[in-house]
Amino acid sequence: MGVEGTCLAGGKVRGVEPLGPWRQGRRPDDGDPGVSTDRRTGPLEAALRARRDAGGKCLVPYLTGGLGGDWVETIQAVAAAGADVIEVGIPFSDPVMDGPTIQAANELALGAGATPTSILDSLRGADVGVPLAVMTYYNIVYRMGLKRFAETLAEAGVSGCILPDLPLEEADPWLEIAAAAGVESILLAAPTAPEERLSRICERSRGFVYGVGLLG
């Protein structure tokens, strides 16, 4: 998936419009049920805002967890090289929303015995030095249990979570549980999404909004 970030969480849809210092809650008249989530800025969003407010560009690279015996050292090296936030992919057996390169990386990591538990255990205490966000599929979260998964992320020192196959209409339970655990839920915005939907995504997303740059 391509990425074109258009707004930080809680901001306006258009990047040229100002962003408030705090996340915005659901508009009372939008007719959408919404969820009760913590509006305090988390470490992931704070890191990106700090870079942006200083006039810089944010660097958020992606690495597949469990790919190679030195993958944690690779993440530490990427952080030391200047990454603001790092996305860590938890491999899934059917990564239909990823491209061929990440699909191949998933296969290699799974073939080497990588599991969600082994990856998060490796991150726990790794002292990467920058906020981490995991990216995986909702099936993994569902099988582990939403509360357990969110709490395991927090215990491993992970700040955010991206679930590309979890639609906005079904995200409320996860958003609430993740917020309670202190995990920032990053939502996706498709290039075909209408303005009203983009506004709801920006209001509910935490950390940043993952802008999908390409269809298919």
Image (spheres, grey):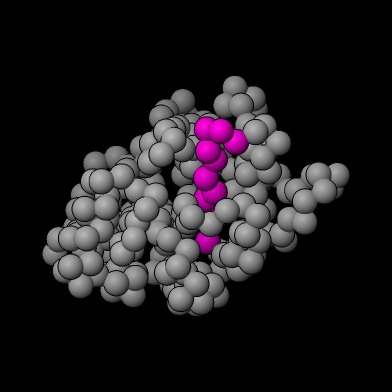
What residue appears at the point 56 percent right and 33 percent down from the top-left corner? 192
**In the image, is 153 to the left or to the right of 168?**
left
The residue at the far right in this view is 29
Indicate the position of residue 124 as horizontal and vertical percent values. 34, 70
What residue appears at the point 52 percent right and 33 percent down from the top-left corner? 191
- Residue 24, compared with residue 113, is above or below; it is above
- Residue 131, compared with residue 191, is above or below; it is below
**In the image, is 28 to the left or to the right of 83?**
right
**In the image, is 49 to the left or to the right of 80?**
right
Magenta region includes residue 19 = no
Indicate the position of residue 200 as horizontal and vertical percent values. 68, 43
Nearer to the camera, 213 or 13: 213
**Which quarter of the rendering shows the C terminus?**
top left
The residue at the far left in this view is 69
Image quadrant assignment for residue 65: bottom left
Indicate the position of residue 90 as horizontal and vertical percent values. 34, 62
Indicate the position of residue 55 as horizontal and vertical percent values. 46, 25
Magenta region includes residue 186 = yes
Q: From which residue to which does the magenta span run?
A: 183-193
**Which quarter of the rendering shows the N terminus?**
top left
What residue appears at the point 71 percent right and 59 percent down from the top-left corner? 35
**In the image, is 91 to the left or to the right of 49?**
left
What residue appears at the point 21 percent right and 49 percent down from the top-left corner? 77
Image quadrant assignment for residue 135: bottom left
Does the rendering let one see residue 37?
yes
Does the rendering let one see residue 130?
no
The residue at the far top in this view is 16
Nearer to the camera, 49 or 203: 203
Nearer to the camera, 120 or 78: 120
Q: How many marks?
A: 0
